[in-house]
């Protein structure tokens, strides 16, 4: 069972927990009650629920601690990514990356290095461009052809049509060499076999 507890603590104790666990605040997110959300490099969360004072006037803080697995605030979305419900649903990999790698640069995506969408630890996440993400994906999935990401060659016109729709004059041999570079020898051989059938 996942570690999931609800705690009341002094701000001093809460500060020690934050410091000792490599927790960093996620700048763009708050809990349902407006409290801060912190995440460490292991995708464990500290979620501030409310603040109050004890009978002596010392400030107290209430928070949830979760390793984000089987926690009541965590679920999976339709794409297989873990999400956490705060003020609304967020993918966990996005929060870990934002807190520890900084804001995502424009035009970049978050890549799961081992391709396991449930493995949201910091060492498994990186910012990459869409093109880099697709290259890494196809390097691990040689043999699966998808023209949406890599374009196609039209025999009747002798043109290569890129995913963005741009057309380039290209012989079949030039196209096969392009496929070898981008997708590997196996993908190129399959295209050749399919053409000769």
Image (tube, rainbow, N blue to C red):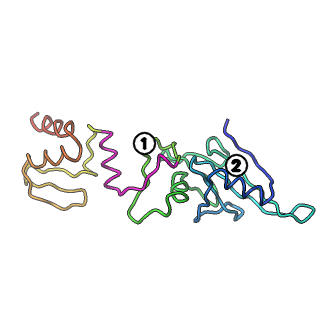
Magenta highlight on residue 134: yes
- Residue 47 image position (x, y, % from top left): 68, 55
Question: Image point 11% across, 55% down: which residue?
Answer: 159
What is the secondary structure assignment of the residue under circle 1?
A: loop
Q: Residue furthest right?
A: 55
Left or right: 131 as drawn, with respect to 177 = right
Q: Quadrant of residue 140?
A: top left
- In this view, 196 is above or below 164: above
Q: Quadrant of residue 142?
A: top left
Q: How many marks?
A: 2
- Residue 124 image position (x, y, % from top left): 47, 46
Q: Which residues are magenta?
A: 122-141
Question: Image point 59% across, 61% down: which residue?
Answer: 26
- The dot on residue 65 is 2
* Main SS class of the magenta portion in the image: helix
- The dot on residue 115 is 1
Foreground of the two, 197 or 112: 112
What is the secondary structure assignment of the residue under circle 2?
A: strand
- Residue 189 image position (x, y, % from top left): 16, 36
Count residues near mark 1 (Cα–Cα under 10 Å), then give few for <14, some for 14-19, many for 20+: few
Magenta highlight on residue 17: no
What's the distance in space between the residues labelled 2 and 1, CA to CA?
A: 26 Å
In the rendered image, which quarter contains the C terminus? top left
Q: Quadrant of residue 141?
A: top left
Foreground of the two, 132 or 144: 132
Question: Image point 14% across, 54% down: which residue?
Answer: 160
Left or right: 171 as drawn, with respect to 50 = left
Foreground of the two, 2 or 22: 22
- Residue 179 image position (x, y, % from top left): 18, 46
């Amino acid at each position: 069972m996942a570690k999931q507890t609800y705690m009341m603590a002094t701000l001093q104790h809460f500060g020690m927990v934050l410091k000792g666990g490599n927790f960093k605040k996620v700048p763009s997110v708050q809990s349902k009650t407006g409290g801060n959300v912190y995440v460490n490099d292991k995708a464990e969360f500290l979620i501030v629920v409310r603040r109050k004072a004890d009978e002596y006037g010392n400030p107290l803080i209430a928070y949830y601690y979760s390793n984000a697995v089987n926690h009541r605030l965590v679920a999976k979305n339709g794409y297989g990514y873990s999400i956490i419900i705060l003020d609304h649903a967020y993918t966990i990999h996005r929060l870990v990356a934002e807190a520890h790698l900084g804001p995502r640069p424009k035009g970049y995506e978050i890549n799961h290095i081992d391709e396991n969408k449930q493995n949201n630890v910091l060492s498994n996440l990186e910012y990459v461009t869409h093109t880099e993400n697709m290259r890494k994906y196809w390097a691990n999935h040689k043999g699966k052809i998808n023209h949406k990401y890599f374009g196609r060659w039209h025999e009747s016109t002798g043109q290569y049509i890129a995913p963005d729709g741009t057309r380039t004059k290209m012989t079949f041999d030039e196209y096969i060499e392009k496929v070898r570079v981008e997708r590997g020898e196996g993908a190129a051989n399959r295209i050749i076999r399919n053409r000769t059938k």
